[in-house]
Amino acid sequence: MKLALVALVALTSGLPALAGESQPGYSISNTCTVNKYREQYVPGSESSPGYVKSWKETVDVPCDESSTTVRQAVPQPQPVADNNDCTEGSIIGGLLGAGIATSSTRGKDQWWAIPAGGAAGAMIGCQIDGG
């Protein structure tokens, strides 16, 4: 979405004029306008400082064929997302790691060894599954 917005702004900012076609009767007339930014400095005095007055005005300009053509955005190739899913490997590895930790520890050590074995097994299982 951001790429499309950037492409739209980049391609339309180079158009110098807006062209509108009308057909009164049987004739065709093209009118092109440009928004011009204007500034005027208003000088001040010792008691009242000067300031800058700014405004935009619409000015009619002669139309040329390059301003009436429609520019289209060129589609850019999108990067391919990594869709490797290692859910099955993580689950199986976590169960195997917790089981190995349970069988190899006794007493108070089981409380920290089972979660640690499950986490290590899940990471190893994910890598084996292709993640």
Image (cartoon, helix red, strand yellow):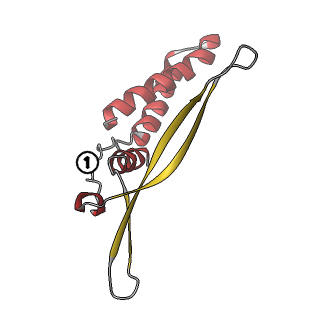
Q: Which quadrant does the C terminus fall into?
A: top left
Residue at image mark 1: 77
Q: Position of residue 105 (x, y in %)?
A: 54, 15
Give the left or right position of residue 108, taking residue 22 as reference: right
Is residue 27 positioned above or below 6 on the image? below
Of helix, strand and loop, which one carries label 1? loop
Residue 128 screen position, x and y as percent:
32, 32
Q: Residue furthest left?
A: 65
Q: Type of residue at label 1? A: Pro
Farthest residue in the bottom direction? 25
In percent of the image, x 69 and y 19: which residue is there? 49
Residue positioned 31% across, 59% down in the render: 62
**In the foreground, 108 or 88:** 88
Q: Residue at x 65, y 11 (%)?
A: 108
| Near-viewer residue (58 or 66) | 58
Residue at the outermost front position: 45
Question: 10 Å neighbourhood of mark 1: few (<14), some, or many (≥20)?
Answer: few
Q: Nearer the viewer, residue 108 or 4?
A: 4
Quarter of the image for residue 54 reads top right
Instruction: Left or right? Give the position of 48 relative to 94.
Output: right
* In the image, residue 98 above or below residue 106: below
**Tag count:** 1
Q: Position of residue 68 (x, y in %)?
A: 29, 63
Q: Is residue 29 above or below residue 80?
A: below
Residue sitting at 31 percent across and 36 percent down? 130
Q: Quadrant of residue 22?
A: bottom left
